[in-house]
């Protein structure tokens, strides 16, 4: 794997994106902003008038903003790493054209993951700007939520793209989205604190990569002063997912493209 | 350096997928400037061989050197000097014709200025100038094929690999493509082609091998192969009924040997391989065989091919 080779793959993804960006504006920007309005402002108005029991005494908009930020990064990375990978390996076979050049299967894979990070950065920047304008980002530390969102995206993009590289059809992809990504979206501390879950279920939330991403983003946007050791633990958990996914993906892409 | 070392050198080249042997210890060499063909029925091992040459499929056993290098250690360096036209198009269908060329050039690390110059030339070469700004998806099969070839030339390759370049194209598109490939040959680009079209092999290849069941069964120029493995002429006899044909086949196998011909009965006709077609026809009809139609023609590569690889369909 060479850095310049990976960049060439990213450049290709960017050029494809130039033609297709309109379709992703809804799922990666408008949808989370609508959620922010409905949940943060609408539902939040009800919640804040009541008990106001959120940890740190946060208002609901401030609480839900980092949750939506991380969850959107996850969802964008997940859908980007399933069907488009199948298009590259089976449907349009563009990846096969790429490995006929000096690029290797690992370059193609890592390029995909890096691009997922770039896309997440763009989407997260736009979302954070809107959320900040609405008053959902009280701390200047909120800028740090950007790399946290990018890390969250790669933690999902790498293993899911690696998995997609093993598949001959897309039948399993909707199952992954509905039974994997959707429950994580709902129960990873995105919309309510994990402490609200029944005690037996809480450890399940802790192994969710999204929970680590949400915790990091929330510490950043609220400026809550998370202990460095805790932050390092979250970063390590997400980094481990991304690294394991890259190791697996260079193998599955290698088998698929160069056997 | 006399004659130059071969661009491709393969000894006992083998490819296995589990227990299945796709390529079974083949030897061949391709020299600079020549157009070399792999002919064979589906499943003969042509594409597996091409993928090994293209350094996208590791060899299972034997020796393979491309441009003097070993694909195991120098894969990217070799691929940077190859152009590959795969059996199935791998174009970026959402992108424009122009962007496909640009992106592919970037994979080879070319600068944007180099790519602009080269892509302009290649669009003219592929007769796609007017479609430069169009998306690839709606282009015809022939246009996509020409774009794939243009794309494979973006790095000015020394060796061009074409895996069934004209399969699925109409005759006009095929002839245009052949003309372009011939032009490349004149420019000195070494080409390796797989095909199961005999006319394509005769048109394009200086030298070829016929593969069957993972092995090379014959090698030579098209003319040499015909001389070696077929007779000069072929007589085709057709009959109105099956019974007549069966009776004729029986009579011929008893007597045609005397006319110097080899008899091959097929379901719809009888073939006689002979050095003298007209003489054989005279001898046969003199013997009382009355076909409904008689055709005397020169042997083609197709006769060689069918005799060497058999007439039965091999659908795995």
Image: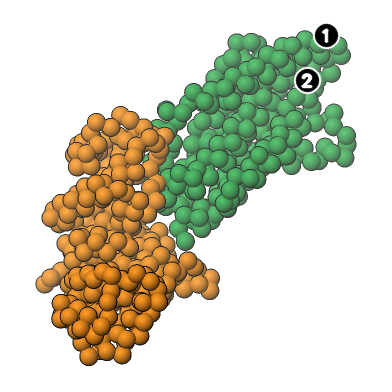
The answer to whether marks 2 and 1 sit on the same chain is yes
Q: Is residue A38 left or right of residue B134?
A: right
Q: Quadrant of residue B301?
A: bottom left
Residue B233 location, x and y as percent?
A: 19, 75
Q: How is the image coloured?
A: by chain
Does residue B66 sit above or below A37 in this rendering? below
| Horizontal side of residue B210 vs A73, given as left or right | left
| Of pointers 2 and 1, the one earlier in the residue sequence | 1
- Crowding at dot 2, Cα within 10 Å, few <14 / some 14-19 / many 20+, comes out as few
Q: Is residue B166 left or right of residue A28?
A: left
Instruction: Say which residue appears at 59% left-offset and 32% top-offset.
Output: A76
Question: Residue B222 location in percent, x, y?
Answer: 20, 70
Answer above or below: position of B61 versus A195: below
Given residues B228 and A208, the one toward you in this image is B228
Closer-to-camera residue (A119/B184): B184
Residue at position x 42%, y 62% in the image? B57
In which quadrant is the N terminus of chain B drawn?
bottom left
Question: Badge 1 sits on which subunit?
Answer: A
Per the rendering, the colour in which chain A appears is green
Residue toward you, B42 or A114: B42
The residue that mark 2 highlights is: A56
Write down the quadrant of residue B225 in the picture: bottom left
- SS state under label 2: helix
| Residue linked to disc 1 | A49
Which tint was used for chain B? orange
Q: Can residue A13 be spotted in the picture?
A: yes
The residue shown at (40%, 69%) is B44
A35 on left or right of B221? right
Q: Residues within 10 Å of mark 1 (few under 14, many from 20)?
A: few
Q: Is disc 2 in contact with disc 1, using a CB cutoff of under 8 Å?
A: no
- The answer to whether any part of residue B184 appears in the image is no
């Amino acid at each position: 794997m060479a850095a310049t080779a990976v960049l060439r793959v990213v450049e290709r993804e960017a050029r494809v994106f130039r033609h297709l960006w309109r379709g992703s504006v809804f799922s990666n920007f408008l949808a989370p902003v609508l959620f922010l309005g409905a949940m943060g402002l609408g539902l939040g108005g009800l919640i804040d008038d009541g008990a106001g029991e959120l940890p740190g005494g946060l208002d609901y908009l401030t609480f839900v903003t980092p949750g939506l930020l991380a969850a959107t990064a996850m969802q964008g990375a997940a859908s980007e790493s399933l069907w488009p990978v199948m298009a590259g390996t089976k449907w349009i076979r563009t990846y096969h054209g790429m490995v006929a050049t000096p690029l290797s299967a690992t370059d193609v894979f890592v390029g995909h993951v890096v691009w997922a990070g770039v896309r997440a950065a763009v989407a997260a920047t736009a979302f954070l700007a809107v959320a900040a304008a609405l008053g959902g980002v009280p701390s200047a530390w909120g800028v740090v939520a950007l790399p946290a969102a990018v890390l969250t995206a790669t933690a999902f993009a790498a293993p899911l793209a690696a998995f997609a590289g093993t598949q001959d059809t897309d039948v399993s992809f909707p199952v992954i989205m509905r039974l994997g990504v959707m429950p994580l979206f709902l129960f990873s501390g995105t919309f309510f604190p994990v402490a609200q879950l029944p005690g037996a279920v809480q450890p399940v939330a802790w192994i969710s990569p999204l929970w680590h991403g949400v915790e990091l983003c929330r510490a950043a946007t609220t400026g809550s002063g998370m202990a460095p050791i805790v932050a390092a633990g979250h970063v390590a958990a997400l980094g481990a997912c991304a690294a394991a996914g890259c190791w697996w993906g260079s193998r599955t892409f290698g088998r698929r493209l160069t056997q | 350096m006399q004659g130059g070392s071969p661009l491709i050198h393969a000894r006992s080249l083998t490819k296995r997928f589990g227990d299945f042997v796709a390529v079974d210890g083949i030897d061949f060499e391709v020299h600079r400037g020549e157009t070399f063909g792999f002919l064979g029925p589906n499943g003969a091992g042509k594409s597996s061989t091409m993928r090994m040459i293209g350094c996208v499929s590791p060899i299972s056993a034997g020796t393979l050197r491309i441009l003097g290098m070993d694909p195991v250690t120098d894969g990217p360096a070799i691929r940077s000097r190859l152009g590959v036209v795969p059996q199935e198009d791998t174009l970026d269908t959402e992108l424009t014709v122009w962007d496909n060329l640009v992106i592919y050039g970037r994979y080879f690390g070319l600068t944007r200025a180099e790519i602009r110059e080269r892509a302009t030339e290649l669009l003219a070469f592929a007769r796609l100038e007017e479609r430069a700004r169009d998306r690839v998806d709606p282009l015809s099969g022939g246009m996509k094929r020409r774009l794939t070839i243009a794309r494979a030339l973006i790095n000015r390759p020394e060796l061009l690999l074409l895996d069934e370049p004209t399969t699925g194209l109409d005759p006009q598109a095929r002839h245009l493509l052949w003309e372009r490939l011939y032009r490349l040959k004149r420019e000195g680009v070494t080409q390796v082609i797989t095909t199961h079209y005999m006319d394509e092999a005769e048109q394009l290849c200086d030298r070829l091998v016929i593969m069957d069941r993972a092995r090379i069964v014959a090698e030579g120029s098209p003319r040499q192969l015909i001389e070696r493995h077929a007779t000069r002429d072929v007589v085709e006899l057709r009959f109105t009924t099956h019974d007549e044909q069966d009776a004729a086949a029986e009579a011929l196998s008893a007597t045609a040997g005397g006319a110097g011909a080899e008899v091959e009965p097929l379901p719809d006709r009888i073939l006689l391989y002979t050095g003298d077609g007209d003489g054989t026809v005279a001898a046969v009809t003199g013997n009382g065989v009355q076909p409904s139609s008689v055709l005397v023609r020169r042997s083609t590569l197709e006769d060689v091919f069918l005799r060497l690889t058999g007439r039965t369909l091999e659908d795995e």
